[in-house]
Amino acid sequence: MNTSLPRIAIVAPSMRILGGQALHARTLAEQLRSEGYEVELIPIDPAFPRGFRWVRRLSYVRTVVNQCLYLPSLSRLRRADIVVASTASYWSFMLAPVPAILMARALRKPVVLNYHSGEAADHLANWGAWIHPWLKLVDEIVVPSQYLQKVFGAFGYRVRVIHNTVDTSRFRFRERTPLRPRFLSTRNFEWFYGVEQTLIAFALVKTRYPEATLAIAGMGRQEDELRRLVQALGVGGVRFLGALEPAAMPALHDGEDIFLNSSVIDNQPLSVLEAAASGMPIVSTDVGDVPNMIEDGVAGTIVPKHDPAAMAHAASLVLEQPERARRMAQHAYERLDRFSWEAVRGQWMQLWADMMRSPRSAQVDGDRRAA
């Protein structure tokens, strides 16, 4: 490690909570370590002692036990020069980043809030005193998209945009020739990801392409409901794969041909970037930053949310026009440069430099000399 570089603590979900936040935190830590930074990941979901693992099945008890383990772990922030608190919205904001912000302030450490949630507009508008006082305590707010920059700007906040990154070397880009009706969804089973809309769209496609298949990788509270929907639709060819580790995702993408995303609330989904990195034609709803990521008709197809018929029509056009689909997939891949580590590296470095010049950097320097 380069001892002249600031020590970074990232407070974020662990890979026990599979999702974009956890993957981004782990990826950022790995990228910073490759640059010589000392990085400590502090999970908001500490591992439960063996005798308490059954508690995870009991929602409220699980939350209490989790907080009893998480809050003491924040004492590790003492070793950091800069604290990065990753967050979503609503109660997860109160339970995870707020304690980290308070501990960082108590230790006089500069703190970055790395906000990822596509629900930001509703959160900022309707949670009032539950969120705005805490936002005023952080030194910087970093968001991954222009979409969230506009949302925060509407409430008077200046934020930095630093894109999420995708490691294209993990995925094998290949042209889908021939293009088969093999569809993929990699969104978790929560209402805002609209996986039920994907299933309905797939059932409509299936009437024209009876050999079509749909692989679904994910987990969440809607799993039983989604399985019942498949039975009610009477559609075959659907495979529920469960929650897959990131290491398994490249092979999954390589085996399928067309990516479907029906989210109704979103920000800058890594799942869309991964699909582009593998060369899959993409059909997605027009939510969050997705239209900026995938230009409609150029790098993918954008359809309205809550409209599975439109998604089914778009997916059928992809199959009917394979050469056009190939060109769009190629354009999507070529535009991934802005989501590479090389593209955002300098932005993170500038952020650390600015943070070390913040009013709390004097305490940081004192801690470093005492260490």
Image (tube, helix red, strand yellow):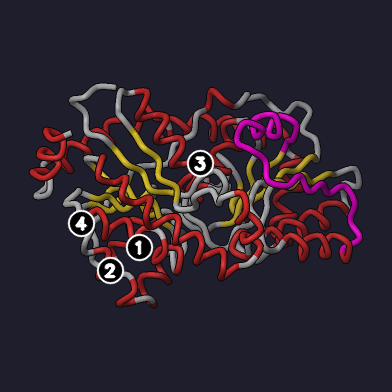
Distance from Cα at disc 4 to Cα at disc 1 = 26 Å
Task: Locate residue 152: give its quadrant.
Answer: bottom left
Q: Secondary structure at mark 4?
A: helix
Distance from Cα at disc 2 to Cα at disc 3 = 28 Å
Circle 1 is placed at which residue position?
A: 151
Evaluate whether residue 291 shows in this view: no
Name the mark on residue 155: 2
Circle 3 is placed at which residue position?
A: 23
Indicate which disc, 3 or 1, sits on the residue closer to the N terminus. Answer: 3
Q: Is residue 251 magenta?
A: yes
Q: 220 or 331: which is nearer to us?
A: 220
Q: Which residues are magenta?
A: 233-257
User: Left or right: 56 with respect to 167?
Assistant: right
Residue 188 location, x and y as percent?
64, 53
Q: Amino acid at mark 4?
A: Arg
Residue at 83% across / 64% down in the picture? Answer: 228
Name the mark on residue 134: none
Note whether 232 is above or below 11 in the view shown.
below
Q: Amino acid at mark 1?
A: Val
Foreground mark, 2 or 3, reads: 3
State yes or no: discs 2 and 1 in contact (Cβ < 8 Å). Answer: yes
Circle 4 is placed at which residue position?
A: 105
The quadrant the C terminus occupies is top left
User: Left or right: 70 with respect to 157?
Assistant: right
Around disc 4, counting alpha carbons within 10 Å, would you say few (fewer than 14), some (14 to 19), or many (20 or more)?
some
Q: Secondary structure at mark 2?
A: loop
Q: Amino acid at mark 2?
A: Phe
Indicate which disc, 2 or 4, sits on the residue closer to the N terminus. Answer: 4
Residue at 30% across / 23% down in the picture? Answer: 36
State yes or no: discs 4 and 3 in contact (Cβ < 8 Å). Answer: no
Q: Amino acid at mark 3?
A: Leu
Indicate which disc, 4 or 1, sits on the residue closer to the N terminus. Answer: 4
